[in-house]
Image (cartoon, rainbow, N blue to C red):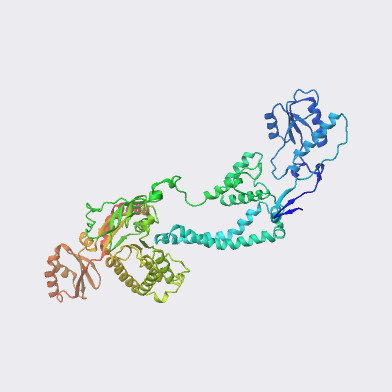
């Protein structure tokens, strides 16, 4: 062993060619022949002597190279021999020129134990004996593999591991990879990533944090693997010594092997194993892998290169852009937003109030539409202006399109058509800039289980660009106003449902978000907490555009500066609470508390003297409820005076007047919107009863 630097020369022992088994194990039972061309009696005599030395069963001639190839593909032959330009010879020439064709389906056999050497040796011996016309005794031919330079520290690993090296590395890294994928999946499931992006987290920073975290954990694994390979490979990896560097698949035809390798490498894991295999093959040479060899096969008969493998690995990353995206104007300069019409968006719809002229439009929604699979329309051509310094409440039945609208406006769902302008940015062309001013509280709590209340507010506040001092002020203010001071250092997973909703609303408001989306923010809160949140929102609406969805009509009535009611994905009415109540003629509610002997007809008769069309809206054991139309408001004073004078005569304990609740308007709008479906529903019920 001659050493120099970190390399050494590997030498092998000599051995006779006759000691090499010319058959692979599974070929011992086959009947073998030689096929040759061209047909000639002297060549036939030469080959007959050759098969005696090889102990084969016979010979067969062919007329052309194509015929010889077809014969070898369709039948079992030990080898094919093509003699060049020797069809018309009358004796054996002094120089014998020929080509050997041997089957190469078994890539596990090396040059030293393939048929090639046996046929070459037998032909040479037969040729010498025939030319000398005597059975002379030829000397024994011995073989010795040429010495080659080999990496000193890697001899064991190359001999022992081979292809399983890639599998070993893949398995060792799979645990860290699966753990990382698990947390990324949880982050995606909870929509934490989208909320962080909405709150100002750059995409590059998000993935840099994941890369850093994963690199730290995988570095530990890689260090252990490197230590084992460095010092213990000869002892630990002996289990793999039966494996050799080989192709994963053997075919009779090389073209099939090429196709197999390409399609198999479409799998990320298979491509990585192929890559490790190629690196190991190159390391068997003196120089190893380098950039000059990226597009060269590791074996003469190889069919795939390391450069192709790396292209497969890169192709598996990310969502592809259009091929010309680096040359687009939008990539370098962004997109300028065209100013949408600021005029009245629903001038012909009597159920939608005219836009005020003295308020700034925070959100302009134009023909927003979302169609899901099977042509299910979730939002159908929504157009509206949402104003600054106001709380706009979206009402609607389940499936009306409220949440879908919010998801589209925040960029978490792409619209099928239409667009919206948020703080002067088009959501279809510049959603990242639009998100810079957005705060979001979705239906479900998007919180980090391991972070405390304080850490959540600090994290999202810093994402919005606040200083440490500003963040601390917001932490103290929001926790005090929402009653979270005692839980400020508690982890999110230990909070109650109401506390989690408070924290989610705080996250949406923190960082001075100009546009705030609150999707059912008071769900799970008790009465006291709801009142505290109402007070906070009424205070925080200054200099903000707040959009809120709820199923509580009293909440919508108290908080809503403007109320929009949606049904079947369409905007049915939109305006201030007073406008809606006036538009749908809900009027006022007259509630009369009656005694046991009260006769409702007497009360109704008195009221009909002033409002002829009035009737009892509802009645129970203690109360009579009437609806007073707004159109008859000029008669209210005289009517109330008469009712007060005859209160004892009518056997009424008391009476009072209140505004009609928003709930009645909501039901009236929904009933009108869904009326066209009533015949279909009734027909379905009738058919079910008949069955």
Q: Is residue 440 left or right of residue 63?
A: left
Which residue is pictured at 75% across the width and 38% down the height?
Answer: 116
Q: Residue furthest front?
A: 4
Q: Nearer the viewer, residue 406 or 135?
A: 135
Q: Is residue 540 left or right of residue 305?
A: left
Judge whether 219 appears above or below 426 on screen.
below
Residue 621, percent from left and from top: 25, 72
Instruction: Tell me if residue 240 can be seen.
Output: no
**Snapshot quadrant of residue 592:** bottom left
Q: Nearer the viewer, residue 295 or 107?
A: 295
Which residue is pictured at 41% across the width and 77% down the height?
Answer: 486
Instruction: Tell me if residue 212 can be seen.
Output: yes
Q: Nearer the viewer, residue 335 or 303?
A: 335
**Snapshot quadrant of residue 214:** bottom right
Q: How many marks overall?
A: 0
Judge whether 226 appears above or below 289 on screen.
below
Residue 453, percent from left and from top: 42, 71
Residue 98, percent from left and from top: 74, 31
Judge whether 36 appears above or below 639 on screen.
above
Residue 158, percent from left and from top: 69, 53
Q: Nearer the viewer, residue 666 or 75?
A: 75
Q: Is residue 251 left or right of residue 11?
A: left
Judge whether 42 appears above or below 567 on screen.
above
């Amino acid at each position: 062993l001659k050493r120099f630097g970190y390399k050494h020369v590997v030498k092998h022992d000599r051995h006779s060619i006759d000691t090499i088994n010319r058959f692979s194990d599974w070929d011992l039972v086959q009947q073998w022949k030689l096929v040759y061309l061209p047909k000639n009696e002297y060549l036939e005599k030469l080959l007959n002597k050759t098969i005696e030395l090889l102990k084969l069963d016979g010979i067969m001639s062919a007329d052309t190279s194509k015929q010889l190839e077809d014969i070898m593909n369709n039948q079992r032959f030990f080898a094919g021999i093509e003699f060049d330009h020797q069809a018309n010879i009358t004796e054996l020439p002094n120089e014998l020129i020929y080509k050997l064709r041997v089957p190469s389906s078994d890539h596990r056999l090396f040059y030293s134990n393939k048929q090639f050497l046996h046929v070459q040796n037998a032909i040479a011996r037969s040729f010498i004996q025939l030319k000398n016309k005597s059975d002379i005794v030829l000397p024994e031919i011995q073989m010795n593999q040429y010495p080659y330079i080999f990496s000193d520290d890697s001899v064991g690993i190359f001999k022992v591991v081979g292809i399983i090296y890639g599998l070993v590395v893949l398995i060792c890294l799979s645990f860290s990879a699966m753990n990382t994928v698990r947390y990324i999946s949880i982050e995606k499931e909870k929509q934490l990533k989208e909320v962080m992006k909405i709150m100002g987290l750059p995409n590059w920073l998000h993935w840099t944090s994941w890369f850093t975290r994963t690199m730290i954990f995988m570095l530990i694994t890689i260090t252990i693997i490197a230590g084992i390979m460095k010092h213990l490979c000869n002892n630990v990896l002996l289990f793999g010594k039966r494996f050799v560097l080989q192709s994963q698949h053997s075919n009779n035809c090389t073209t099939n092997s090429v196709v197999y390798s390409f399609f198999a490498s479409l799998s990320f894991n298979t491509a990585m194993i192929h890559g490790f295999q190629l690196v190991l093959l190159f390391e068997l040479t003196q120089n190893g892998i380098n950039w000059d060899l990226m597009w060269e096969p590791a074996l003469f008969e190889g069919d795939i290169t390391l450069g192709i493998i790396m292209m497969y690995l890169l192709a598996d990353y990310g969502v592809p852009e259009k091929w010309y995206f680096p040359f687009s104007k939008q990539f370098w300069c962004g997109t300028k937003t065209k100013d949408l019409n600021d005029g009245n968006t629903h001038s012909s719809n009597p159920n939608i109030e005219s836009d005020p002229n003295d308020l700034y439009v925070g959100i302009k929604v134009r023909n927003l539409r979302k169609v899901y699979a099977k042509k299910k329309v979730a939002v159908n051509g929504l157009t509206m202006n949402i104003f600054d310094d106001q709380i706009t409440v979206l009402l609607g039945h389940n499936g009306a399109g409220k949440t879908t609208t919010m998801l589209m406006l925040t960029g978490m769902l792409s619209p099928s058509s239409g667009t919206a302008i948020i703080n002067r940015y088009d959501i279809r062309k510049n959603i990242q800039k639009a998100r810079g001013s957005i705060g979001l509280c979705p239906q479900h709590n998007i919180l980090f289980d391991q972070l405390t209340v304080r850490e959540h507010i600090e994290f999202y506040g810093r994402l919005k660009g606040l200083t440490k001092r500003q963040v601390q002020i917001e932490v103290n203010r929001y926790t005090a106003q929402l009653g979270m001071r005692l839980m400020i250092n508690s982890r999110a997973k230990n909070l109650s449902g109401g506390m989690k909703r408070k924290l989610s609303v705080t996250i949406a408001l923190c960082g001075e978000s100009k546009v705030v989306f609150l999707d059912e923010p008071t769900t799970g809160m008790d009465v006291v907490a709801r009142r505290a949140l109402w007070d906070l929102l009424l205070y925080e609406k200054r200099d903000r555009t707040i959009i809120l969805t709820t199923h509580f009509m009293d909440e919508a009535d108290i908080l809503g500066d403007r109320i929009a009611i949606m049904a079947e994905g369409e905007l049915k009415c939109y305006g201030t609470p007073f406008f809606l109540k006036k538009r749908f003629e809900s009027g006022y509610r007259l509630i009369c508390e009656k005694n046991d002997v009260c006769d409702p007809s007497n009360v109704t008769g008195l009221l009909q003297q002033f409002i002829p069309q009035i009737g009892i809206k509802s009645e129970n054991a203690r109360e009579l409820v009437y609806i007073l139309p707004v159109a008859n408001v000029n008669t209210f004073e005289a009517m109330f005076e008469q009712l007060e004078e005859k209160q004892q005569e009518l056997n009424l304990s008391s009476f009072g007047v209140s505004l009609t609740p928003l709930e009645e308007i909501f039901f009236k709008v929904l009933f009108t919107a869904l009326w066209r479906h009533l015949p279909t529903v009734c027909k379905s019920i009738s058919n079910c009863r008949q069955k």
